[in-house]
Image: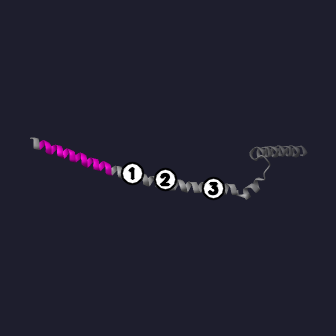
Amino acid sequence: MKREINEKKKLCNEKEREYKERQMLRFGNLIDLDSLEVAGQSQAVLDKLQEYQRTEKKCIRDKEEKDAELQKIQRELTDCIQKNTDLLNMIRDQGEQQQKLNN
């Protein structure tokens, strides 16, 4: 029985050592993970989140402006195409009239 207890203690000590090694690799020192969860987000994280939200809003606003500009340009292009089509039709009609007059 005493041997089993010693083996369990030895196993427990080994697991604790592995746990501490992992913490050292992740965080650079030993950290109480329970207190880390309770601490919540740091001010730096909150500042970055706020900065991200501002940047996101600016990007959305810029995109909306560019979309509106694109729609305006597309309308202008459509108008130009329509005017060109009208001019080509007028040229064709005048050509037909000229041929009728020549005949």
How many residues crowd around disc 2 within 10 Å: few (fewer than 14), some, or many (20 or more)?
few
Q: State whether residue 41 appears in this view.
A: no
**Identity, as a three-letter code, of the amino acid under mark 2:** Lys
Mark 3: amino acid: Leu
Q: Secondary structure at mark 3?
A: helix
Q: Position of residue 74 (x, y in %)?
A: 38, 50
* Residue linked to disc 2: 63
Viewer-proximal residue, 18 or 2?
Answer: 18
Name the mark nearer the viewer: 2 or 3. 2
The magenta stretch is 79-100
Identify which residue is drawn at 74% across, 55% down.
Answer: 36
Q: Could you say which quadrant of the image residue 56 lies in? A: bottom right
From the viewer's perspective, is the residue at label 1 or at label 3 nearer?
Answer: 1
Mark before the other along the chain sequence, 2 or 3: 3
Q: Which of 10 and 45 lies nearest the eye of the viewer?
A: 45
The kind of residue tagged 1 is Ile
The residues tagged by marks 2 and 1 sit, at their Cα atoms, a distance apart of: 15 Å
Mark seen at residue 73: 1
- N-terminal of the pair, mark 1 or mark 3, is 3
